[in-house]
Amino acid sequence: MRVGIVGAGTMGAIHAAAWRSTAARLMGYVSAQESQSDQFAALHEIRRYKAFADLLEDVDIVDICTPTGTHKSMVLEAAQAGKHMLCEKPIALQQEDAEAMIEACQKAGVRFFVGMVLRFFPQYRLAKDLVNAGKIGNLTVLRLKRVSYPPQKKGDNWYIDESRSGGMIVDLMVHDFDFARWVGGEVQRIFARRSRSDQGTAEYAQAILRFQSGAIGLIEGGWAYPAGIFRTGFDLSGSDGLIEWNSDQPGPVHVLRAPQAEDAGAVGLPISGIAEDPYTTEICHAYDAIRTGKAFDVTAEDAVQSLRIALAARESINTNQPAIL
């Protein structure tokens, strides 16, 4: 099948490399950023299309790696053209937009996959399997952490514009909201608080979740570390045991030295510590499912529910009250 990528930024580059591990034919890409485009074309040796409509004419699958605020219009146009789609998370900025995107794809009869990549990290998938197998009894408490550095994107840094990215809570913490719901079930209510630096670029948030099962979750997220440092982790407590993991190396004392700012990527990406990159695993899975008609491991509806939790967390911060889902 023929694939086209929309966006030549950080995620576009990661997806382009991952597609090389499939049997798909990478036709080319389209990008609004001239400064990124030439480098992207040279690195991946693919054609640049001048317009999204031109790309649609030559592909079977569109891989959308553009700012979140553009997802809806691109998905609707691709669906109308009868193209299958991969779309980076979060699915959209608002629940109504996400639902409209899903409806358009259903009406057009095209497949729509949203890149909730955390489900393809082996540590998180193993934890989910252990909980399902009853290895720690009834799940009672979930604690999840995801803290990176403020986005360093030069020029148009759309990540720090909440009207375009949803902000840190929607763009970053959505991963752990998705994992929390995947493991713990439906969320009943959420209370969240956030702190920001005087400059407004660094922020840190905590969200307390109450699940319908009675379990409780604590999720920490932030754009707060020095450039180049990204730390993640979880511990899942049950009536009969505990599952824990974090991205730090073992040792009684571990010092993380920040690299030079210019060596850090535009946005932080977690490291899996395994041979195959989880983004490659994710894209290989999505491609195989589209090609064969198999079900996706994570659905677009799952992506909507993780967005709902993130938006509820932001509502709680703004109102200083719990938000009910």
Image: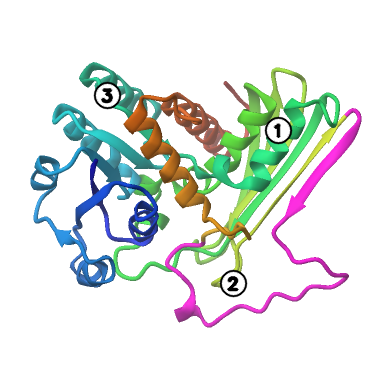
Could one spot residue 86 in this view of the protein? yes
Residue on which the image places disc 1: 129
The residues bearing labels 2 and 1 have C-alpha atoms spaced at a distance of 34 Å
C-beta proximity under 8 Å, tags 2 and 3: no
**Which amino acid type corresponds to the residue marked 1 in the rendered image?**
Asp
- Please tell me which residue is depicted at 69% across the width and 59% down the height of the picture: 247
Q: Residues within 10 Å of mark 3 (few under 14, many from 20)?
A: many
Judge by depth and name the residue closer to the eye, 263 or 281: 281
Quick one: quadrant of the N terminus? top left
Q: Going from the N terminus, do you reach mark 1 or mark 3 first?
A: 3
* Residue 287 at x, y percent in the picture: 36, 39
Badge nearest the viewer, 2 or 3: 3
- Disc 1 to disc 3, C-alpha distance: 31 Å
Name the amino acid, label 3. Answer: Cys
- Placement of 46 over or under 296, stated as above or below: below
Per the image, the residue denoted by label 2 is 226
Q: Secondary structure at mark 2?
A: loop
